[in-house]
Image (spheres, rainbow, N blue to C red):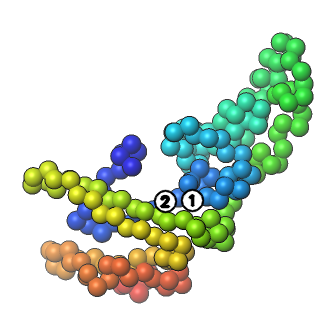
Amino acid sequence: NDGLGSVLFSSIPTTVTHHIDAYSPIAPPHKKKSANVVDGNGLVLREVDSATEAGGGIPCPVCGETYGTVENLKRHIAYNTLMEKTDDIPVEGSHQDINVITSEVTKPFELTEDDIRESLKDKEIVCVFEGIEPMVSGTFQALQSYMADDIVFGGRFAPCMDKQRDWVVVDIDKFHEILPPSTDLKEKK
């Protein structure tokens, strides 16, 4: 996504990953609801933003304002409780309600492999790689489609690059090889 500043060098094999969090389009909808996820309204939201306090991860169940930590959410509620008391706002359903912060609100978002498999069973993931050829500035695209059966959970691509003397050599036969989760990377040594 160019909007996030991504750059790839297409002449070098690269592994691109997608962290599946509560805001991911791959996350099951019922899990998003239980994580109290707010709609991004077109913004690209990521759960990791809450760890850096750059964006919200824990939404206030009253107003939807998001906070990076539970402590910041509690401060928000305490402040708004004072303001609402001053303005004579009814207690029920407001920040004054003592039942606002529940374990449900602060529960971490958890996904299992089975959750992801179930969510992907009727979906297709289409990866689009677009680049510009430097000699004549021609645009090119490569498309790859993946179904749930194509995904190897916990798998890794086999190492396909090796340095020999002053050259970097790519073993094309290993380019699409996937190592199962139990395979140790040390066998490359």
Q: Earlier in the sequence, mark 2 or mark 1?
A: 2
Specify whether 175 is left or right of 41. left
Q: Is 161 placed above or below 116 here? A: below
Give 32 or 69, whichever is nearer the viewer: 32
Disc marking residue 26:
1
Structural crowding at the residue carrying mark 2, measured as other residues with C-alpha within 10 Å and reported as few (<14), some (14–19) or many (≥20): few
The residue singled out by tag 2 in the image is: 18
Give 161 or 39, whichever is nearer the viewer: 39
Question: Is residue 75 among what the camera can see?
Answer: no
Residue 134 pos. (x, y %): 14, 54
The Cα atoms of the two marked residues, 2 and 1, are separated by 9 Å
Residue 157 pos. (x, y %): 40, 76
Residue 79 pos. (x, y %): 77, 23
Residue at left 84%, top 12%? 86
Specify whether 146 is left or right of 105. left
Residue at left 78%, top 29%? 77
Tell me the element at label 2: loop
Residue at left 50%, top 83%? 180
Q: Is 131 placed above or below 40 here? A: below
Disc marking residue 147:
none
User: Could you tell me which quadrant the C terminus lies in?
Assistant: bottom left
Amino acid identity at mark 1: Ile
Give 187 or 44, whichever is nearer the viewer: 44
Kindly check if marks 2 and 1 are in contact, taking CB atoms under 8 A apart as contact. Answer: yes
Residue 27 pos. (x, y %): 61, 58
